Amino acid sequence: MSNPKFAKLIRKINIYPPYLGMGIRVASFSDDFTRFEVQLRPRWYTRNLFGTHFGGSLYAMADPFFVFIVTMNFGRGYVVWDKSASIDFLKPAKGTITGIYEIGLERLEEMRAEVDALGKSTFHFEAELLNESGETVARVSKEVYVRAKG
């Protein structure tokens, strides 16, 4: 299912100015675009008043990836948008932070079947942001809206 066009696009995210400036990079992604591992590295100029990662950077590292997974796996016959999002800050985020965003192929097929039957639907996803010790520093919740075109 690997699509060279999508792979090239994902690699370009690492030079997207907001991500580049915040120290966010896609560390890896699966060939079928169902899993992204994203890292936020510390920068002196993105720390908050308490010396930890700025909360906006923590959210930014999670922002597009569930939409990317759905879009890249559903194709042009669907409209995919973020509907809502929230982030719970659980502990101070220091050092390199990692987020893994993943939707399994089976779940994607279930979602596609639901959208094809109903014309549209909204799906909920969560991801944990982990520090270098593997502790959860934040939890991101996203709702993704999907509608069949036409």
Image (cartoon, helix red, strand yellow):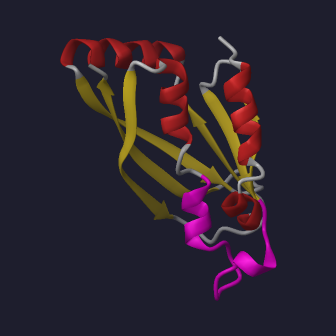
Measured as percent of width and height from the top left, residue 69 is found at 54, 30
Image height check: is 114 above or below 42?
Answer: above
Q: Position of residue 118 (x, y in %)?
A: 19, 18
Residue 98 in view of the camera: yes
Q: Quadrant of residue 122?
A: top left
* Residue drawn at x 77%, y 38% as measured from the top left: 11
Q: What range of the chain is rendered magenta?
A: 41-61
Q: Residue at x 39, y 40 (%)?
A: 81
Q: Depth check: 72 or 56 in front?
A: 72
**Number of callouts:** 0
Q: 106 or 46, which lies in front? A: 46
Q: Is residue 141 above or below residue 31?
A: below
Residue 33, how many percent across, how many down? 63, 25
Please tell me which residue is depicted at 59% across the width and 25% down the height of the picture: 34
Residue sitting at x 28%, y 19%: 115
Please state if 54 lies on the left or on the right of 42 as rendered: left
**Is 52 covered by the magenta stretch?**
yes
